[in-house]
Amino acid sequence: MRVPQIEPITNMTRDHRAVLSKLKAGPVFLAQRSTPAAVLLSVGDYERIMARLEKLELLAEAERIARSIDSGETKTTSHAELMRLISEKE
């Protein structure tokens, strides 16, 4: 587990380059009056998180459909129907 990188939010205005350079080592937590206010992520970290979230949402939908089939509520679900159901949730 990484030690969180914490920076006072005022450092963003004083030396934003130094704060942004820390993103290479992971997320940077910005604190305002010693209270977490925001998290900065690199674009790569953000894209990885979003890709993982999308996969988890698809898995959850597939599990819901599998439960529906197992319970007899639904006989089958075509790929096209599955994609339609997923797109409706977005």
Image (cartoon, rainbow, N blue to C red):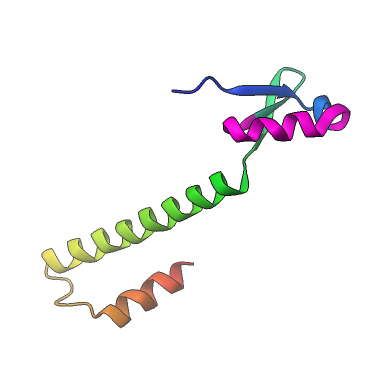
What span is colored magenta in the figure? 13-28
Magenta-colored segment: predominant secondary structure = helix
Residue at horizontal 50%, vertical 53%? 50
Q: Nearer the viewer, residue 81 or 3?
A: 3
Residue 59: percent from the left, percent from the top?
A: 30, 57
Q: Nearer the viewer, residue 47 or 9?
A: 47
Answer with the quarter of the image where residue 84 lies. bottom left
State the residue at coordinates (36%, 53%): 56
- Seen from the viewer's position, the closer of residues 64 and 44 is 44
Would you say residue 24 sits in the magenta stretch?
Answer: yes
Q: Quadrant of residue 15?
A: top right
Residue furthest right in the image = 14
Left or right, 21 with reference to 50:
right
Residue 8 vertical position relative to residue 66 in the rendered view, above or below: above
Residue 40, image x, y percentages: 66, 37
Is the residue 47 above or below the residue 88 in the image? Answer: above
Residue 55 located within the stretch drawn in magenta: no
Q: Position of residue 34 (x, y in %)?
A: 72, 17
Taking the image as shown, residue 82 lies to the left or right of residue 24, namely left
Where is residue 12 shown, x and y percent of the image?
A: 81, 31
